[in-house]
Amino acid sequence: MDAKKRILIVDDEQINLEFFDVMLSKLGFEVRKAEDGLEALEVIRKHRPDLIILDNVMPRLSGWEVTRMLKTESEYAEYADIPIIMFSAMDDVKDKIEGLELGADDYITKPFNFAEVLARIRAVLRTHELIHQIERRDSRLDISEDLADLALDFVAGFREALGKVVADADMKAPAESLAKVLDDAKRGLAKLDELDARASSLRAEAESLKRGETSLSAIRKRVKEHVAQ
C-alpha cells in the first residue's frame, strides 16, 4: 500500500518539511511539500495526494482554513474525501475538537514522535481504503439490484406473452406443428421460472447485504470519536 500512496506535507518550518520528506520517502511514499496553505491548495489540485499532513499555524492560510475549504467549498468538492492529519503546537482540547469537526481525520500535537505519526498515517490510510471498498461494494450492489429488477420485469412480460400462446394452443386441437410450438413455449416458461427464481434470489441477496452494511457516516463518526479520545 505505502509505495503507491502520495502524501502532501504542509508546514512553514523547512526543517519539518525536509524531515518528513526524507523519512517518508525512505518508506516508499511519494512526498510532496508546501510551505503555506495557498501553496498546499495548488499542489492538491495538481497532484491530488492520498493524504495531507497539515500544520495548523501557517502564513497566508492556516491549516483550519485549508481544511474548511477542502471539506465545505464546492470549488474543492472533488478533493473533499482526501484524509487530513493536522499538526499543532497547541495542546488544547477545543483546538482538537475544532480541527476534527472541520473534517480532519486525526490531530497530533507537536512535538511529535515519528513512530506514532507513521502509525497514525497508516491507520488513516487503511480506514479510507476500507471506506472506498465499501463505496465500491455499495455501487456493485446497486448495479445488481438494477439488473435483477430488469430481469424480473422481462420475465413477467415474457411469461405473460407465452402464457397467452399456451392458452390459445390448448383451446384448439393442435396439429403436429402446433404441438411442437406448444412444447417449446412450455419449455420456455420453465426456463423463465428458473430465471425468475435466480433474479429474485439476486435481488434478495443484494438487499440483505445492503441492510447489513455499516453506513459510511457511522464509520467516519466512530473513527473521529476514537481519535478525539
Image (tube, rainbow, N blue to C red):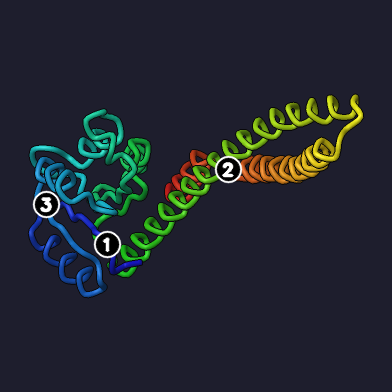
- Amino acid tagged 1: Phe
How dense is the environment of label 2, judged by Cα within 10 Å: few (below 14), some, or many (20 and up)?
some
Question: What residue sits right under mark 3 in the picture?
Answer: 34
Residue 226 % position (x, y): 48, 50
Residue 44 visible in the displayed image: yes
Are the two marked residues, 2 and 3, in contact with CB atoms closer than 8 angstroms?
A: no
| Residue drawn at the location 24% of the way across and 56% of the way down | 110
Give the mark, 3 or 1, whose residue is nearer the N terminus.
Answer: 3
| Residue drawn at the location 90% of the way across and 24% of the way down | 171
State which quadrant residue 122 falls in. Answer: bottom left
Q: Relative to 154, say whether 43 is above or below.
A: below
Q: Nearer the viewer, mark 2 or mark 1?
A: 2
The numbered mark at residue 112 is: 1
Q: Nearer the viewer, residue 133 or 84?
A: 133
- Amino acid tagged 3: Ala
How dense is the environment of label 3, judged by Cα within 10 Å: few (below 14), some, or many (20 and up)?
many
Q: Nearer the viewer, residue 88 or 154?
A: 154
Give the mark, 2 or 3, whose residue is nearer the N terminus.
Answer: 3
